Amino acid sequence: MKHYAVFGQPITHSLSPRIHAAFAAQCGIELEYRAIEAGRDDFARVLDAFMRDGGVGANVTLPLKEDAFALCAARSARAQRCGSVNTLIRDGTQWRGDSTDGSGLLRDLRERHGFESRDRRVLLLGAGGAARAAAFALIDAGVRELLIANRSDGRAFALADVLGPCAAACPLDGIADQGNFDLVINATAAGHGGGAFTVPAPQVQAHTFAYDLSYGKAAQPFLDWARSAGIARSSDGLGMLVEQAADAFELWHRVRPTTASVYAMLRA
């Protein structure tokens, strides 16, 4: 039986073991998939122990995606571009890295929420590993403009610089002066502590859509903030989680599972 895992901190809440168990049952594949707690200080050691114990593939979540990138001997083109890895594939005694966050986001936006990114104006809150993956995917999808705001201004402006002419950055306290947005994405970890989401509200339109890359309780502070800002449509990232997991599953097993029934199970 092949061994897989998801690494992060905190990790006990992760739905990834349930998702991959459901995919495996659907595709007739036997595997073990578990959640492993690891912080930035001990991730390399814990990942190495996982490999020695027979681990052949892994997912990586907060706060380890950029650390995972650094630990890979080889990386896909999309992982190389965004400097972030959320999927690890064992290659002999080394790891090969890929990033499925961006493709998972776009598929969920399009197929579950009917949101086409092309020619849209998007506000992205955050500039970490998940934000970078989302940013490159949105640029590739043809957004008209991507504005990035982050608590550390330097990271936001640095990300905008590498994304090209369709991207720009601004301080968090300046987003109210940047005009209307079609889509507002939260890629920060602000909701994971359970406190209120305190970012200044942007200008919105009747059709503005708010989306949190996190899911469940971690997304609720942002969703509450979006509602108070007058944004009528919003969603957490549960669909993105399922879609990026399907991409990872396909990388490992060379078969793509269907996602609708798994998403419905988790949402129920």
Image: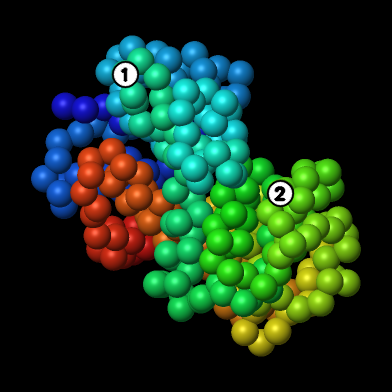
Mark 2 or mark 1: whose residue is earlier in sequence: 1
Q: Amino acid at mark 1?
A: Gly
Which quarter shows the C terminus? bottom left
Q: Residue 1, image x and y in percent? A: 16, 27
Q: Amino acid at mark 2?
A: Val
Secondary structure found at label 2: helix
Q: Residue at x 48, y 63 (%)?
A: 106
The 10 Å Cα crowd at callout 1, few under 14, some 14 to 19, many 20 or more, is few
Farthest left residue? Answer: 28
Q: Residue 128, image x and y in percent? A: 66, 43
Residue 162: which disc? 2
Q: Horizontally, is 168 left or right of 119 in the view?
A: right
Q: Residue 95, image x and y in percent? A: 41, 24
Q: Residue at x 62, y 50 (%)?
A: 131
Q: Does 48 sit above or below residue 81? A: above
Residue 100 appears anywhere in the view: yes
Tag 1 residue = 92
Farthest bottom residue? Answer: 206
Specify the quadrant of the image occupied by residue 202.
bottom right
Q: Does 42 sit above or below residue 21? A: above
Q: Does 2 sit above or below residue 140? A: above
Residue 22 appears anywhere in the view: no
